[in-house]
Image (tube, helix red, strand yellow):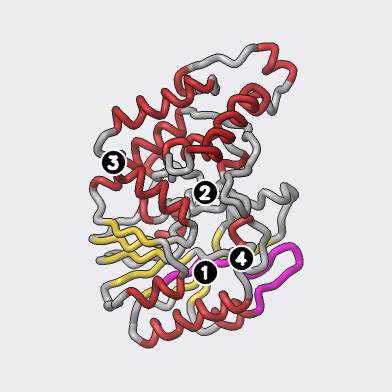
Amino acid sequence: MTKKEINRSPLFYVGDKYKLISELKTYFPKTIKRLVEPFVGGGSVFLNVKADEYLLNDIDSHVIQIHKYLCEQAYSEYAFFNNLFSIIDSYGLSCSYKNNAIPQELKTQYKKTYFAKYNKQAFNTLKENYNKSQKEDTLTLYVLLIYGFNRMLRFNKKGDYNLPVGNVDFNLNTYNSLTRYFKEVKNKSIKWHNMDFNNFFKEISFTTDDFIYLDPPYLITLSEYNKYWDEKSETNLLSILDTLDTKNIKFAISNVTNYKGKENGIFLKWSSNYNVHNIKSNYISYHDNSIKEFNEVLVTNY
């Protein structure tokens, strides 16, 4: 699978498997009847894996909200892009895809951050309007994601979106990822869920034709979505997988075993009973841009 053949998630999820999917797929079963993902995230795995059915879950309600919305928009692409560009234009945000030129003096003065400088005021107005009265508007939330810091989703205790502007805009990569997402989801039989992984597993009647891919929060790393994960969560998940293994249900799970001097002893001990494959990692932490010492693995029970 070449880079041009890989479908990138239009959510641009931090730490997603876009750069690793070609390598990961070499360890996946050749034929998959139903792909089950308890931690679907941005969706780069399901977008690049062929199966008869897809059972996809994430505990983040906003992530599932955007996925469901984009799946619906796949059947009205023209209207979707018209509405999206209408928001971008009405707020005066830059749009590289449409060649909206940022003033050269801004590019000269802020060589690495001119998108952020140009879009800051417009982005803050959009954010303020969303938090005040548009929280049901998924398209506005998606625009905030595209223009927000590191293209992340983060909310405060009041439920307000609270990230600052990012240093990127709507560009050709964003457009291409959306059109390819639309093409893929129209040809896939997908069921979306928004649940804790424990409850999600309880809902499913597994068969030996299923394949489960898991990319849970990493216990020893610092990403935003890892802060609610603890040793109890890790132990519960691995116990569920042990039970599924006794029923001959195939699974593959990604994890980081070592990170900046820390070691995930729980996962290391558990994985010794299965097949461990070292993976060239693309782990990103928005807390820390320094060179990271880590080891990412894929563990399979087949």
Q: Which residue is mark 1?
A: 277
Give the CA distance from mark 1 to mark 3: 32 Å
From the image, tell me which residue sits under label 4. 228
The x, y position of residue 114, in whole percent, is 66, 23
Residue 13, numbered circle: 2
Q: Give the amino acid at mark 4.
A: Tyr
Tag in front: 1 or 3: 3
The percent position of residue 212, horizontal first and vertical second, equals 38, 69
Residue drawn at the location 52% of the way across and 48% of the way down: 13
Q: Residues within 10 Å of mark 3 (few under 14, many from 20)?
A: some
Q: Quadrant of the C terminus?
A: bottom left
The label nearer to you, 4 versus 2, is 4
Residue at mark 4 to residue at mark 1: CA–CA distance: 27 Å
* Residue for point 26% across, 73% down: 209
Q: Earlier in the sequence, mark 4 or mark 1?
A: 4
* Mark found first going from the N terminus, 3 or 4: 3
